[in-house]
Image: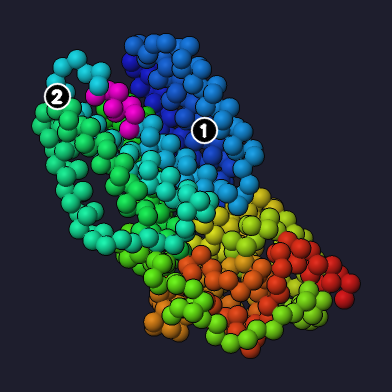
């Protein structure tokens, strides 16, 4: 295949990547966007395999079969509650792939590397290795293999600064002398360590930001590897992932009214800060009254408007289909139903949107935070499904709260608030929620799916 045809194929793939990314900006076009991006990647892969010099097609085909098989099994069997963990792993694998390709190019070089290649190799190895171990730590936190709270240790800042300086020094030595294998090994080793140390101090409600940031890192590493291989398709696709990941990270930080530096180094959700229910932000602030679905049905049946606020509890209970059926039942009774989705609800960006889309909730029923908040004072019922931190009034009222200033869904301003939770345990940020003790709040304890099914049945029979 001629070079011109290959470059034309890469150009077509790049156009499909851009159009696919644009399609992801709306739920209505997201499926088509994914299909276009996938088609672009297929074209890029086929064109790359036809480049002269690519050998051992048997090994390549074996890798595609094994990797594709593992991916297909994981995609079909993974529970929606574990989707954040899967995304974290995929970010890590992407970083690992970029780093391994760069390492292979460095090791196989027959002479001194010149131009931009040494710099690209160093960036790919550094960012890819950080992405690999950082993503694995994020996976372990989300999977609760280790504590989800932030972990700090003495002299953490100075230690990280020293390791960072040594890593950058090793990177500079490799660029200056590509034959310096000792510096190259130091670069790899310390990059892997830094990935762990960067994510361990992050916990609580900051994990969605970490996932989007690591996604950006994987794109940056892929872009750098594209320069190593002189592959324009890889440069374009990596740039798109890196840039979109950074933009998403900025959106997530804005949704929490925090800077990226504060997320990375603020240790929000640290062990000292959330020592337990007797701690500064974990104490019980009053008494709550437990209601039954039948009690709630009386109020629902006399309402004109309901806003549903999904949270991680809905994901754990796999309650999204039951929630849609409840919404259908309410609408059959002439009640207006909308869904309010906070940007950082769940444990990854868009977690709640994916769940609701899976349950065929109409896109026009999903309303963003800034648009839905003015409606709460005029709303009869706000139904909170396992959400905690994103509806915590402390973000508005308590200047001493770790989440003070974070934009929230103002559910407490509705006439009635029903909160479905398994228990009174704090949310992922580890702080108590005064919403549960307000006079207009009614708690319904139990599995979200079972409670919603019972609630829908009670509404139908009322």
- Pick the residue in front: 385 or 232: 385
- Pick the residue in front: 13 or 265: 265
- Residue beneath label 1, please? 38
User: Which residue occupies 42% across, 11% down?
Assistant: 56
Question: Which image quadrant: the C terminus?
Answer: bottom right
Question: Does the magenta-highlighted stretch encompass residue 100?
Answer: yes
- Pick the residue in front: 14 or 53: 53
Q: Position of residue 351 (x, y in %)?
A: 55, 55
Label 1 CA crowd tier, 10 Å (few <14, some 14–19, many 20+): some
Query: Looking at the image, is 145 positioned above or below residue 292?
Result: above
Label 2 CA crowd tier, 10 Å (few <14, some 14–19, many 20+): some
Task: Name the N-terminal-most of marks 1 and 2.
Answer: 1
Per the rendered image, the range of residues in magenta is 99-106
User: Which residue occupies 76% across, 63% down?
Assistant: 450
Q: Residue furthest right?
A: 461
- Residue beneath label 2, please? 179
User: Which residue occupies 69% across, 84% down?
Assistant: 289
């Amino acid at each position: 295949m001629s070079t011109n045809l290959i470059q034309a194929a890469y150009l077509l793939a790049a156009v499909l990547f851009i159009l696919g990314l644009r399609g992801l900006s709306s739920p209505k076009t997201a499926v088509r966007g994914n299909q276009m991006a996938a088609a672009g990647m297929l074209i890029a892969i086929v064109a790359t395999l036809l480049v002269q010099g690519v050998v051992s097609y048997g090994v390549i085909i074996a890798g595609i079969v094994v990797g594709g098989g593992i991916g297909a099994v994981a995609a079909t069997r993974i529970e929606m509650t574990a989707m954040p963990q899967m995304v974290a792993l995929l970010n890590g694998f992407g970083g690992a792939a970029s780093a391994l390709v760069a390492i292979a190019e460095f090791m196989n070089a027959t002479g001194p590397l010149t131009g931009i290649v040494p710099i690209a190799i160093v960036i790919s190895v550094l960012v890819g290795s950080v992405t690999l171990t950082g993503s694995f730590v994020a996976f372990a936190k989300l999977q609760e293999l280790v504590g989800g709270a932030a972990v700090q240790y003495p002299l953490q800042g100075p230690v990280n600064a020293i390791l960072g300086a040594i890593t950058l020094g090793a990177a500079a030595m490799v660029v200056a002398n590509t034959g310096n294998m000792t510096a190259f090994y130091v670069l790899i080793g310390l990059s892997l360590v830094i990935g762990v140390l960067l994510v361990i101090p992050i916990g609580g409600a900051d994990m969605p930001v970490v996932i989007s940031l690591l996604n950006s890192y994987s794109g940056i590493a892929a872009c750098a590897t594209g320069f190593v291989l002189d592959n324009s398709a890889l440069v374009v696709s990596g740039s798109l992932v890196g840039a979109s990941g950074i933009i998403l990270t900025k959106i997530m930080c804005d949704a929490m009214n925090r800077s990226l530096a504060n997320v990375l180094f603020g240790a929000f959700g640290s062990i000292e800060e959330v020592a337990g229910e007797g701690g500064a932000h974990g104490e019980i602030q009053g008494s709550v009254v437990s209601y039954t679905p039948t009690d709630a049905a009386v109020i629902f049946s006399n309402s004109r408007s309901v806003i549903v606020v999904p949270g991680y509890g809905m994901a754990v209970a796999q309650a999204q289909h039951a929630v849609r059926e409840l919404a259908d039942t309410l609408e059959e009774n002439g009640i207006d139903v909308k869904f309010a989705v906070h940007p950082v609800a769940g444990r990854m960006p868009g977690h709640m949107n994916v769940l609701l889309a899976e349950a065929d909730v109409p896109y026009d029923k999903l309303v963003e935070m800034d648009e839905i908040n003015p409606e709460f004072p005029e709303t009869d019922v706000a139904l909170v499904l396992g959400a905690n931190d994103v509806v915590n009034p402390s973000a508005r009222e308590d200047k001493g709260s770790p989440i003070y200033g974070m934009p929230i869904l103002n559910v407490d301003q509705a006439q009635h608030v029903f909160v479905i939770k398994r228990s009174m345990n704090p949310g992922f940020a580890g702080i108590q929620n005064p919403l549960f003790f307000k006079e207009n709040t009614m708690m319904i304890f139990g599995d979200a799916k079972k409670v919603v099914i019972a609630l829908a049945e009670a509404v139908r029979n009322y």
